Amino acid sequence: MTDTAAANAVDYLLKRHRFRPSEALPWVLAVAAFFVFPDYMALGTQVLIAIIFALSLDLILGYAGIVTLGHAAYFGVGAYAAGMLSAHGGWNEPLTGLVFAGACAAIVGFLSGWVLLRYHGLTLLMLTLAVAILMQEMANAAEIWTGGFDGLTGITIDPILGMFDNDLWGHHYYWYSLAVLALMFYVTRRIVYSPFGQALVGIRENVGRMHAIGSPVHRRLVTVYTISAAMAGVAGGLFAQLNAFVTLDVLDFARSGAVMIMIILGGTGRLYGAFVGATVFTILEDELAKISPEFWEFGVGLVLVLTVMFVQGGLLGLWDKVSSRWIKRSA
Amino acid sequence: MQDPSAMPALQITGLNKNFGALQVARDINLALRPGARHALIGPNGAGKTTFVNLITGALPPTSGSVKLYGEDITGLTQAQRAQRGIARTFQINQLFRGVSVLENVCLSIAERTGDCNALWRPAGTGRAVIDEAVHLLDRVRLTEDALKKVSELPYGRQRLVEIAIALGQDPKVLLLDEPAAGVPSAESHIILDVVDSLAEDIAVLIIEHDMDVVFRFAKEITVLVSGGILTAGTPDEIAADERVREVYLGGSHHG
Ligand SMILES: Nc1ncnc2c1ncn2[C@@H]1O[C@H](COP(=O)(O)OP(=O)(O)O)[C@@H](O)[C@H]1O
Ligand SMILES: [Mg+2]
């Protein structure tokens, strides 16, 4: 009896990181969407970029428990980095542009994280907000470089792999973004299932005990924060390449807030929450804003309140509850 | 020079701690030899938990020093001290409640071994960590609960997880802060059995209110009152000490 319990437990840990068949679903849907809604690929690309951004937040918020209201700082740094590389540097190759965007955001993430992550709770929350505001002020002030309030123009991006340009229907950028998302997802998934990822969960669950068992908590947090910033930067870089235009909006509090809502809506700390939350949020935003902007703000507020009040764990948490009840009933 | 085998595992010298005007540690001197079975007793608010916090580095002392096998660790962080072999349990559970019992223990082991620095390989490939965790769960009789979330366990079992995490650190010095606190007496024997079966070379300091447990387990006893050591000695000496009976034992007889 005890032996089987032990064997089951070992077995669970040994196999936990393996891909489950159900994990193919979002990718199948993403590919299917291309064929079913070919006219909506511009929106589709926005969704994919939002997922990358939300995934980067899930890594720090959902896994490590770092609550931030300033994650747009790194999205924005990535967007400006990719934009300026082309506009001022004359370097128009998109893939290296994304790497550059990620690297710049990682540097800012590392430096700010080093300071920020010595704090927690409300202080940390305010400091993350302050970093984003600071970045936005700097972008505004450095007008010669960023275009300031008028935005950064003069971005020209070469065709992807020398072959696929930013076509009118957004088809190429959809595939490009999907490929980048797949890569970012793979990285995130590896981290989440690694021993380092388990340590992050430990920090989220009980940081005091982590100190007591000898975990270098600050180092772990700075590491994951830097990775997350890099991913947010890649999302921002993709955004800049897609639009060939960057404005101060990329650093806006609204963007930090939106990504937070996405991840809460989808469910934190579960990888696919970012997919669900970012998709629902972006599509709702698009649909409701067509009716009227106020309607959108009201709608998103309502959805968030309902989620927080009635479903802990977001929409995916709700799905778990419904499906497990259904399984029980049919059993 | 001292003979290394005679070197104390833990040596506390002149330890003081003030919270504002309140003195919660007054010139505490205490040594644990390797393999020590030492009990720290004293009324509520005497400063026992604070003393543990000072040893582990959770709190900085106002003055005094802590040495681990001769090395002065007073200036080290809590995590550095833990890495050097000081482990503790908490009077009030400090667990990773949202994850399974097994993962709680794996985490403690993997932080000790350095596995947690690996961010690119699946935790499931760390077979040594998993095997050690399973073995440890068997020792504390938590195997049946291995895959249950800690938050789903009854309190008494959670207290076992509390100890298992500390044991996962493979400690040289183990500080047990009221390990059976809050556990119904019908179940507390499981916890005390685990405490009794600890490896002989670990130096153990236990804070415990149940005098039967103290007198059965400890070879030395220190009595703490208002932050200062009232007296220290063998269980027989402590049992015979009039002052101890007055402040702590309330005149009842033991031993
Ligand atoms: N962080 C703190 N700040 C101020 N006073 C504290 C703090 N921690 C403990 N104390 C006080 O120190 C005294 C000793 O507490 P504690 O070490 O928990 O005692 P014990 O474990 O012996 O019951 C108590 O009077 C308590 O109120
Ligand atoms: Mg106490």
Image: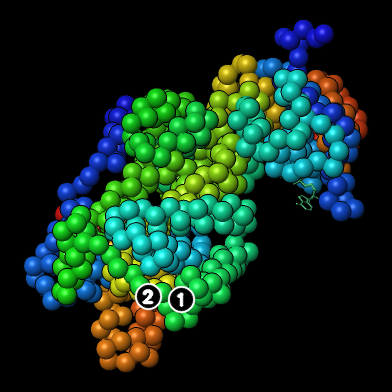
Question: Residue at 17% of width from left, 71% of height from top?
Answer: A167
Specify few, some or many for label 1: CA neighbours under 10 Å numbering under 14, 14-19, or 20 or more. some
* Residues tagged 2 and 1 counted as in contact (Cβ below 8 A): yes
Regarding residue B164, the answer to whether it shows in the image is no
List x then y, in percent, for residue B159: 55, 40
Spot the residue most to the left. A35
**Is B182 situated left or right of A13 in this image?**
right
User: Which residue, given by chain and number where applicable, does mark 1 sit on?
Assistant: A147
SS for dot 2: loop
List x then y, in percent, for residue A81: 42, 62
The chain letter under disc 1 is A
List x then y, in percent, for residue B122: 34, 37
Q: Quadrant of residue A317?
A: bottom left
Specify few, some or many for label 2: CA neighbours under 10 Å numbering under 14, 14-19, or 20 or more. some
Residue B194: give its label. Answer: none
**Is A132 situated left or right of B251 in this image?**
left
Question: Residue at 77% of width from left, 42% of height from top?
Answer: B60
Residue A153: give its label. Answer: 2
The chain letter under disc 2 is A
Q: CA distance from mark 2 to mark 1?
A: 7 Å
| Of the image marks 2 and 1, the number of the one nearer the N terminus | 1
